[in-house]
Amino acid sequence: MQVTQISTNYATDPEVYHHPSGDLILPVVLDPAVAAQVRVIADRWKSESLSEAVADVLLVGLMSINSTARLT
């Protein structure tokens, strides 16, 4: 549940968040398509197997790298 809330907030609100571990999650400006995918993953996180969720997170990471490369 905490992961879902953090992921949802992270995708929609560019503020600094404190992870339950004590680490800071710093703001990142995400491409709108990447942010939308993060929200979808957060919504599906609790209903799917871990391997599917991890595969989705890796996909979003690649999308984010691709969108960052296009911006520079």
Image (cartoon, grey):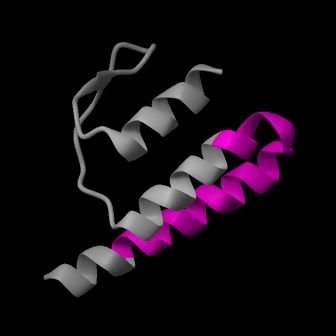
Q: Depth check: give the residue in front, 69 or 32.
A: 32
Q: Main secondary structure of the magenta part?
A: helix
Residue 34 x, y percent position in the rendering: 45, 64
Q: In this view, does 2 lie above or below 35?
A: above
55 part of magenta stretch? yes
46 part of magenta stretch? yes
Taking the spot 35% from the left edge, 13% from the top edge, the residue there is: 22
Q: Magenta residues, as a range?
A: 43-65
Residue 56 x, y percent position in the rendering: 66, 60
Q: In this view, does 68 lie above or below 12?
A: below
Q: In which quarter of the image is residue 59?
A: bottom right
Taking the spot 30% from the left edge, 38% from the top edge, the residue there is: 13
Q: Is residue 36 above or below residue 27?
A: below
Q: In this view, does 23 lie to the left or right of 27?
A: right
Residue 25 x, y percent position in the rendering: 30, 32
Name the outermost residue toward the bottom: 70
Q: Is residue 44 left or right of residue 66?
A: right
What is the quadrant of the N terminus in the image? top right
Q: How many labels does the image show?
A: 0
Name the outermost residue toward the left: 72
Taking the spot 26% from the left edge, 74% from the top edge, the residue there is: 68
What is the quadrant of the C terminus in the image? bottom left
Q: Is residue 54 left or right of residue 12?
A: right
Residue 37 x, y percent position in the rendering: 55, 60
Q: In this view, does 9 lie above or below 70?
A: above
